[in-house]
Amino acid sequence: MFGMRRARRPSRGPVAIASSPWIVVLAGVVVMVVLLIVALGAYRGRSPAPDAGSPPPALPLPAVPSEEPTPTPTGSSSPALLPGLSPRATGVPSSSSAVSRAPTAGVTPTRAATRAAQAPAVGGRYRVVQSFDGGFIGEVLVVNASGVRRGWTVRFEFSGGGRLVTTWVEGVPQGTVRQFDGGFTYVSGVDVPPDGSAALRFHLERASVTPRGCTVDGVRCSGF
């Protein structure tokens, strides 16, 4: 018995694999999953080639800040300056200088301005409208040279012992007549507008066509 050898047992590895086929299937599935994961990672790492027919994507442009006008402070009292003029320029009148001012010292006014300043606000021109046997019709044209409506008073003195028959102003309310020895005064019933006029007419008998005196608001009439 001591001289006999025991027979070797056959290895159970291949027999176990052959007897359990699900182990092979499971190993194959694991290998396929690993290969699929590797393939997906390689695909994601590659960037897709751009299409030859499509234009390249537009690059975003940097935002340009808009130019907003500088706000003007509302509480500032300084006047707005015009281009090319300094704050000391005297050729631009301010909004509060619409009313004309008197000439400053050292500036000689023109002759027209001097005459306008010396001219009366209301004046009169005398003329004879119609003459006939025993009398005539005269007229004093009252002219308002001022810039406002003005009332007026005419004082007329005649010579030759004449007599006043009537006085009138056509188309307007009549004024007040006061007679005195050798003449009369007429106070207007309506004002004369700026640069306007009113014609006072009167009928005199037995009087000279050349009056002794004629004034409008104390200013001598012209025309005689």
Image (cartoon, grey):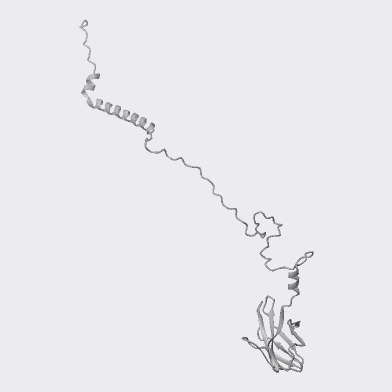
Q: Position of residue 32 (x, y in %)?
A: 29, 28
The quadrant in which residue 105 appears is bottom right
Q: Position of residue 142 (x, y in %)?
A: 69, 82
Q: Nearer the viewer, residue 6 or 17?
A: 17
Looking at the image, residue 218 sits to the left or right of residue 2; the answer is right
Residue 191 visible here:
no
Q: Nearer the viewer, residue 49 or 169?
A: 169
* Looking at the image, residue 102 lies above or below residue 152: above
**Which quarter of the rendered picture does the C terminus lie within?**
bottom right
Q: Position of residue 155 (x, y in %)?
A: 74, 87
Q: Position of residue 21 (x, y in %)?
A: 22, 25
**Which quarter of the rendered picture does the N terminus lie within?**
top left
The mark tally for this picture is: 0
The quadrant in which residue 144 appears is bottom right
* Looking at the image, residue 214 lies above or below residue 82: below
Outermost residue on the front side: it is 133
* Looking at the image, residue 184 lies above or below residue 86: below
Outermost residue on the right side: it is 106
Looking at the image, residue 29 sits to the left or right of residue 167; the answer is left
Residue 18 visible here:
yes
Q: Residue at 76% of width from left, 71% of height from top?
A: 114
